[in-house]
């Protein structure tokens, strides 16, 4: 299973973290520090796997962003590599040629997408289309909810205005 | 508010404490608006762990949301369930989740399945009655749900293979449908049909098929299909391929599948991508258990990976080497491991590799000397990372010898150990574990061979105790060692005079805060005051191996008990019969289950555990606290109880781990066969244990050879040597074969064909004694009979001219056969003639000239003839030298390996 997902920028800034195994806040910072030291220093031609504390970390670099997933020793590393790619493709489709800034400003959306893709450390949905559909459904629902609330607040505001007048 | 919470998530992600805001996130999930609720759920899943206090506030909301008729709300709640529900709260949500398994929306069904999977991971018993649901969901008409179902099934099957054998057929048919692209297009990924589902299925099949022939037979066709259909140009295709290999290596072996697996592996290893190499090495490690011979073709690729700058790849390769270690290559592999161990500073991995070194050394050690040296190295470098058990093992080994009834060898071993330890003690900083071993050995055997005086040893021991004054255990070991030495002296009737520093040390220890040290010091004082006879009975010399009978039943107390009962005491009731008594202390040695069933149960949901261990025998208690007790009884006891297999005697070293016997036969290096040093011709017979070739085989060997030699062109001789030593290339046997080939030439053919690259430099050097040209035996068997086999030359020739040119080369050499000795040889002997004065020169020279030969060979055709006469003599001399060095295994031949490992 996947123990955690990390997105780190090339400067070592954390862009997204998702923990599927319990880690305390202290451990988390330690893990991030250790791993960014380990991964960011690796050369471009080396393989995308790192052994770390008896676990394996699979990482892939997209532009200035490193996507890392930590897995058990007996998992299929290439598969994880493809899961990362899968995630990036979904992100790409959702944001339309995704870049680091998209993730910084909409990181909660990146989380929602990740939640549709992985759950409890396992890949739950191998179909890009399904993920996209679900996320879109959520978004549209959110939109309508937003409209409703804004209209309600408008009405209230108007009522308040008229009342005060 | 929503924005704030998102900011808070960000703050937390950057590693700052945001716990003040958790409660607001919890409040948000109560909100009616879906927008806010989802954000709240997101924040909560990111903030909280399953054992957080706030969970209890969330459960109620989750319950409500699971019943919601908006499936998005349900999904959000299920996401949270997967992350946040812990063992205690599972019952609260379980019924609702089971209901959701029949939800019309597939996304909900899928998440419900995953939630159940999570529950299963947390507490298997809570969902054990729901297994049938998983089976039902496997037939779900949505592939996503089906794929998700595979996750829990995989876990279930891992734990209990046998109850799912009936599913093999359905898994196979699903896999077949997937592979035949029956799934909707949306599940394709990079033109592969649903690869993630395929991988999951293959994993499950591997589990189901392992050591089950019948189940495996059902899988053969579909796995074979996948092998064929996999597109090895894309990453995902390789992922599926890799999974296929894993599956093949795990199920009941099928020759055809193994073949395709081997093909796939060789593609992986040959690829430029490090990822694929890595996977190739890993796959090789899996497959090598079943068909050891496939590693043969990949030896050079493996060596390349070992030299690779990529650390991950290196580690993986070490893992592979670890798996294929056998008695013939253990020295090289362990040497390499230790080298690597020195070069890293990652403690976690260092510990692991150290324990592997120890394990290998114990299992395969060719000689006691080597074992002790290796252990010394491991201790020195890995220090306190080594398990203490290893140290005790080493002590036992030294004490018992190797189980052979050869006292002189044992005492030799001991004195050499003492010597090396005395030497090592000079070094400034030693790990505590190692010091304990040193102290113990010095105490036990320091004066045994009379080489060192007692005062010298005691002086050293005092130094140790002083230098490591903050390590109590070491000090205790040192004091005990002192006591032993003095006791031996007294027993031998010599007068004991304590050194002044020893006196001061004792003064110090007598006042020590540690009662252990204090007691030891007093005991030492007492022993010194006794007369020789008494001392001898207390501390008999060299008695550390004698067994002590421990009377567990304490039968010698029977009289006392009888007496007590007669006086009216109550008879003893065994603990198991003493029900209802809340005397907790009596239950200490009993398993927890019993204790909890008899006494009050404090933990409401505690599950009955398997009985952990029946009563611990008293002896093992002694072994857990292995602080030396002055009586020699301590080591004995610990030895009895430690269960680590006895360190390899020669007999043990021949027994192979991982079913590698096939390998050994084919490319095993039989270097430490005693016969090698005596007669060349006989040793040849045993080389590689292969029967002799006849004419039909030569064709085969030629093809392989040309393949090999083409590869060799880019490979430095050093690597070849390493390959040889790792993969059992007989650097020495090859020499042998070359020198002795007059008497038995066919067998030397054999050698060459199976380990050609091993050390052809060496061999060719040898063969310069005999002029006849190499390539003869390819084409003309008649000529071969006149011209002794010169296999290494074939290699050289092969390097120059790959297969297409071989025939011409044959022609050339056959004409040149007897009349003139071939060029290459001449060039070779020139280089070696200059070098043969010193052994080291020869050895260092060995690695380089062949390369130049390869290049220059074709051009310098006419050189050789004139130098023929003197060369013969030179090379004979040199031959003798090399043989001297070569007969013994690498430990006695350090130059060779220094060269390689450089």
Image (tube, coloured by chain):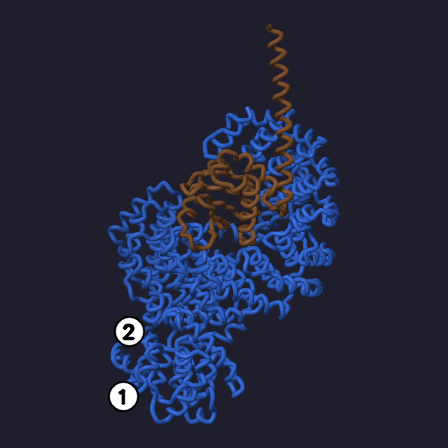
Chain colours: A brown, B blue
> Along the line of sight, which residue is nearer the eye, B444 or A51?
A51
Q: Quadrant of the N terminus of chain B?
A: top right
Q: Is residue B447 above or below residue B818?
A: above
Residue in view at x 51 percent, y 41 percent: A98
Chain letter behind tag 2: B
The residue pinned by badge 1 equals B867
Pinpoint residue B354: horizontal percent, then vertical percent: 43, 57
Q: Residues within 10 Å of mark 2 (few under 14, many from 20)?
A: some
Of mark 1 and mark 2, the one earlier in the sequence is 2
- Tell whether A3 sits left or right of B413: right
Q: Residues within 10 Å of mark 1 (few under 14, many from 20)?
A: some
C-alpha distance separating marks 1 and 2: 24 Å
Q: Is residue B277 visible?
A: yes
Instruction: Give the structural element (helix, strand or loop) at label 1.
Output: helix
Q: Is residue B641 above or below residue A128?
A: below
What label does residue B586 carry, if any?
A: none
Number of numbered discs: 2
The residue pinned by badge 2 equals B840
Q: Is residue B500 above or below residue B727?
A: above
Residue in view at x 37 percent, y 46 percent: B472
Q: Quadrant of the C terminus of chain B?
A: bottom left
- Tell whether B400 sits left or right of B105: left
Chain letter behind tag 1: B
> Along the line of sight, which residue is nearer the eye, B192 or B690?
B192
Q: Is residue A74 visible?
A: no
Pinpoint residue B645: horizontal percent, then vertical percent: 51, 62
Quarter-of-image position of residue B579: top right
Pinpoint residue B559: horizontal percent, then vertical percent: 59, 50
């Amino acid at each position: 299973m996947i123990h955690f997902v990390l997105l780190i920028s090339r400067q070592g800034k954390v862009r997204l973290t998702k923990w599927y195994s319990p880690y305390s806040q202290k451990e988390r910072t330690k893990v991030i520090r250790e791993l960014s030291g380990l991964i960011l220093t690796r050369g471009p031609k080396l393989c995308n796997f790192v052994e770390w504390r008896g676990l394996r970390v699979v990482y892939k670099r997209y532009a200035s962003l490193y996507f890392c997933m930590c897995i058990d020793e007996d998992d299929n590393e290439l598969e994880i590599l493809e899961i990362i790619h899968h995630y990036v493709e979904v992100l790409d489709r959702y944001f339309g040629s995704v870049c680091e800034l998209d993730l910084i400003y909409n990181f909660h959306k990146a989380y929602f997408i990740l939640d549709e893709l992985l759950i409890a450390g396992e890949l739950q949905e191998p179909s890009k289309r399904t993920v996209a559909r679900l996320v879109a459904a959520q978004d549209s629902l959110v939109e309508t909810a937003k409209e409703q609330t804004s209209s309600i607040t408008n009405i209230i505001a108007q009522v308040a205005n008229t009342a005060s007048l | 508010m929503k924005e704030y919470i998102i900011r808070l998530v960000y703050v937390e992600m950057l590693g700052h404490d945001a716990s003040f805001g958790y409660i607001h996130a919890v409040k948000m999930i109560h909100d009616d608006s879906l927008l806010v609720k989802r954000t709240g759920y997101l924040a909560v899943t990111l903030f909280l762990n399953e054992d957080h206090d706030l969970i209890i506030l969330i459960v109620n909301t989750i319950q409500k949301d699971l019943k919601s008729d908006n499936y998005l709300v349900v999904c959000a709640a299920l996401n949270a369930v997967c992350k946040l529900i812990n063992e205690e709260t599972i019952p609260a949500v379980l019924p609702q989740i089971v209901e959701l398994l029949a939800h019309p929306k597939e996304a909900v069904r899928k998440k419900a399945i995953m939630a159940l999977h999570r529950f299963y991971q947390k507490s298997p018993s809570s969902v054990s009655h729901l297994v049938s649901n998983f089976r039902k969901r496997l037939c779900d008409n949505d592939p996503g749900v089906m794929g998700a179902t595979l996750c829990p099934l995989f876990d279930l099957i891992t734990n209990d293979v046998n109850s799912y054998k009936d599913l093999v057929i359905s898994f196979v048919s699903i896999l077949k449908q997937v592979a035949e692209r029956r799934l909707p297009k949306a599940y394709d990924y990079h033109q592969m049909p649903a690869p993630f589902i395929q991988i999951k299925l293959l994993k499950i099949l591997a589990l189901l098929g392992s050591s089950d022939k019948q189940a495996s037979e059902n899988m053969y066709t579909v796995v074979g299909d996948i092998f064929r259909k996999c597109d090895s140009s894309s990453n995902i295709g390789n992922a599926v391929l890799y999974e296929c290999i894993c599956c093949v290596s795990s199920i009941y072996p099928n020759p055809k599948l193994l073949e395709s697996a081997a093909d796939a592996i060789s593609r992986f290893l040959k690829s430029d991508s490090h990822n694929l190499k890595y996977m190739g090495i890993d796959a090789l490690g899996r497959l090598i258990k079943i068909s050891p011979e496939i590693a043969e073709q990949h030896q050079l690729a493996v060596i390349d990976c070992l030299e690779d700058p990529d650390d991950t790849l290196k580690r993986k390769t070490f893992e592979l080497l670890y798996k294929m270690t056998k008695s013939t290559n253990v020295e090289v592999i362990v040497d390499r491991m230790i080298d690597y161990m020195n070069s890293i500073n990652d403690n976690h991995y260092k510990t692991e590799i150290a324990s592997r070194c120890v394990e290998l050394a114990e299992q395969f050690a060719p000689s006691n000397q080597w074992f002790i040296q290796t252990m010394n190295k491991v201790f020195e470098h890995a220090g306190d990372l080594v398990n203490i058990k290893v140290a005790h093992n080493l002590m036992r080994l030294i004490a018992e010898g190797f189980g052979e009834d050869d006292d002189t060898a044992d005492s030799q071993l001991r004195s050499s150990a003492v010597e090396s330890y005395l030497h090592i003690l000079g070094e400034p900083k030693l790990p505590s574990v190692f010091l304990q071993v040193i102290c113990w050995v010095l105490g036990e055997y320091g004066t045994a061979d009379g080489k060192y005086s007692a005062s010298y040893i005691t002086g050293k021991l005092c130094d140790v105790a002083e230098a490591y004054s903050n390590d109590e255990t070491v000090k205790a070991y040192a004091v005990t060692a002192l006591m032993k030495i003095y006791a031996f002296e007294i027993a031998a009737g010599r007068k004991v005079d304590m050194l002044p520093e020893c006196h001061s040390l004792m003064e110090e220890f007598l006042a020590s805060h540690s009662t252990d040290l204090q007691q030891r010091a007093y005991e030492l004082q007492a022993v010194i005051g006794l007369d020789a006879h008494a001392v001898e009975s207390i501390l008999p010399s060299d008695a550390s191996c004698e067994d002590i009978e421990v009377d567990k039943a304490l039968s010698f107390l029977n009289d006392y008990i009888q007496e007590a009962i007669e006086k009216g005491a109550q008879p003893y009731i065994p603990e198991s019969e003493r029900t209802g008594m809340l005397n907790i202390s009596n239950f200490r040695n009993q398993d927890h289950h019993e204790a909890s069933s008899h006494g009050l149960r404090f933990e409401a949901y505690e599950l009955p555990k398997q009985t952990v261990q029946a009563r611990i025998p008293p002896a093992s208690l002694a072994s857990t606290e292995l602080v030396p007790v002055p009586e020699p009884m301590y080591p004995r006891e610990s030895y009895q109880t430690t269960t680590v297999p006895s360190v390899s005697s020669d007999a043990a070293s021949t027994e192979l781990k991982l079913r590698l016997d096939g390998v050994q036969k084919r490319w095993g290096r039989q270097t430490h066969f005693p016969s090698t040093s005596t007669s060349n011709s006989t040793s040849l017979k045993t080389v590689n244990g292969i029967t002799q070739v006849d004419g039909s085989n030569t064709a085969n060997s030629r093809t392989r050879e040309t393949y090999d030699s083409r590869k060799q062109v880019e490979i430095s001789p050093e690597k070849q040597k390493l390959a040889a030593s790792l993969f059992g290339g007989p650097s020495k046997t090859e020499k042998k074969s070359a020198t002795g080939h007059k008497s038995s030439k066919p067998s030397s053919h054999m050698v060459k064909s199976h380990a050609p690259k091993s050390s052809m430099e060496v061999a060719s050097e040898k063969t310069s004694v005999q002029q006849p040209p190499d390539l003869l035996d390819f084409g003309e068997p008649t000529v071969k009979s006149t011209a002794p086999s010169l296999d290494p030359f074939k290699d050289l020739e092969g390097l120059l001219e790959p297969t297409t040119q071989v025939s011409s080369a044959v022609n050339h050499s056959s004409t040149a056969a007897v009349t003139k000795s071939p060029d290459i040889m001449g060039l070779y002997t020139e280089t070696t003639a200059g070098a043969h004065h010193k052994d080291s020169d020869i050895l260092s020279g060995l690695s380089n000239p062949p390369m130049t030969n390869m290049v220059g060979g074709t051009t310098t055709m006419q050189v050789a003839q004139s130098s023929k006469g003197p060369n013969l003599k030179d090379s004979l001399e040199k031959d003798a030298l090399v043989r001297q060095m070569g007969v013994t295994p690498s430990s006695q031949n350090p130059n060779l390996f220094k060269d390689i490992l450089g």
